[in-house]
Amino acid sequence: MEPFTTHSLAFSRITFLNYLIRLYLVFFAGLALIESASFLSTVEGFCLLLAKLIFVVFHVFDTSITLNVAVLRHGFAGFALEVAASCSALPQTWLFISALLAFPATWPIRLVRILLGFGVVQLLNVIRLSLVFYL
């Protein structure tokens, strides 16, 4: 192992700053794209897909749930949940993906981590929306 020197400390600070600069550039560019009007139809389509997924999961346990476009409604209690763009967890997912893109790694490893991370973040989002709906 190499002894600790001020040169290695300065190098690690530069490497860390490069990582942070890449992270901020990738994150804010992607966030601007997600929030842009041209990307809005894609976000709405993702919300519809998310609402259908939540409906399928809910309908297994409770058959009184109905789905109207992106609104989940409980048949007996009457309360409803609209899966809107703010419920998609896309900005949080993009933060995770931009961190992976900014961190130095090979592309196959990045791709596997991006796919796994996207799945985990969206799974946690479905759990979050389930808790919001039933609690």
Image (tube, rainbow, N blue to C red):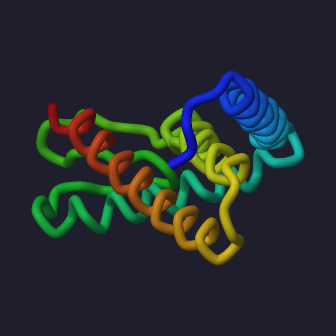
The residue lying at 16 percent from left, 69 percent from top is 60
Image quarter of the C terminus: top left
The residue lying at 64 percent from left, 77 percent from top is 108
Where residue 30 sits: x, y (%)?
A: 79, 42
Q: In the rendered view, tell whether residue 38 sits above or below residue 36.
A: below
Q: Is residue 88 visible?
A: yes
Quick check: 83 left or right of 77?
A: right
Q: In the rendered view, tell whether residue 101 sits above or below residue 116.
A: above
The residue lying at 67 percent from left, 49 percent from top is 103
Where residue 58 sits: x, y (%)?
A: 22, 59
Which residue occupies the foreground of this view, 22 or 15? 15
Where residue 11 sits: x, y (%)?
A: 75, 33
Q: Is residue 31 visible?
A: no
Which residue occupies the foreground of this view, 112 or 123? 112
Where residue 67 sits: x, y (%)?
A: 38, 56
Furthest toward the right, the residue is 38
Quick check: 129 left or right of 65?
A: right
The residue lying at 33 percent from left, 48 percent from top is 124
Which residue occupies the foreground of this view, 45 or 90? 90
Q: In the rendered view, tell whether residue 9 sits above or below residue 101.
A: above
Q: In the rendered view, tell whether residue 7 sits above or below residue 45.
A: above
Furthest toward the bottom, the residue is 108
Quick check: 100 left or right of 117?
A: right
